[in-house]
Image: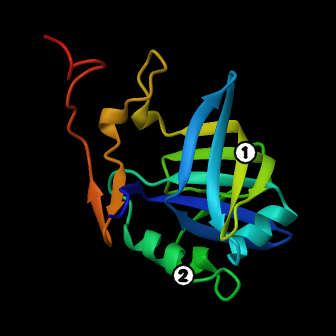
Amino acid sequence: MEAVQTGVLLKTKVDDKVNSMTISWGTLGIEWATELFTVFVREHRFTKEQIEKNPEFTINIPLGAFDKKILGVCGTKSGRDIDKFKEARLTKEEAQVVDAPVIAESPVNIECKVEKIVPLGSHHMFMAKVVNIMVDDDYMEDNGRFALEKTNPLIYSHGGYYETGKKLGTFGYSVRK
């Protein structure tokens, strides 16, 4: 059985070399009032080398009409060999806090600084503190609430990308009488 995962892009930068990688093993959460993003990267990936040299990265979340082919380019080719921004026709923008770019086409960009690296054999776990989040105004409500129902996030399962969007209920709806 294959896990259902979201399609997300991770950006790194060392000197002038920028890399983009499609990730599916990542978690955004809060631990003791600290926002963290945890990502698992394979041992031999160029992204792992980049993060070890510059322990900062951005997470770019494609939503809505985002071109799904970009996830394929960034997930199947190595940044050692090609310029993925050029190949995927992405627009680089400077992040506000970290030294790694964000994607102009991405409505949600999360800036992270690595706090801990845990080798796990075939993968390394990078635990990073979230230091800034940029969200397009189209996905925010006046009261500051992130409007998830407007986002239509991508899901990856068994070789295919799918869109979501239907609200099923509220907290505890499945056990109410």
Q: Is residue 147 left or right of residue 78?
A: left
Q: Is residue 78 left or right of residue 141?
A: right
C-alpha separation, residue under disc 2 versus residue under disc 1: 28 Å
Q: Is residue 28 visible?
A: yes
> What is the basis of the colouring in this image?
rainbow
Q: Is residue 95 visible?
A: no
Q: Residue 77's spot in the image, x, y percent?
A: 56, 83
Residue drawn 38% across the image and 58% down it: 3
**Residue, far bottom:** 81
Q: Is residue 43 left or right of residue 73?
A: right
Where is mark 1, residue-wise? 128
Mark 1 belongs to which amino acid?
Ala
N-term-proximal mark, 2 vs 1: 2
Q: Quadrant of residue 133?
A: top right
- Tell me the quarter of the image containing the C terminus: top left
Residue drawn 48% across the image and 47% down it: 107
Q: Nearer the viewer, residue 83 or 4?
A: 4
Q: How many marks?
A: 2
Please state which of the two labelled residues, at mark 2 or mark 1, is closer to the viewer. 1
Q: Residue 125's spot in the image, x, y percent?
A: 69, 55
Mark 2 belongs to which amino acid?
Glu
Residue drawn 71% across the image and 84% down it: 80
162 vs 136: above or below: below
Where is mark 2, residue-wise? 87
**Residue, far top:** 177
- The circle on residue 148 is none
Q: State yes or no: discs 2 and 1 in contact (Cβ < 8 Å).
A: no
Q: Residue 163's spot in the image, x, y percent?
A: 27, 54
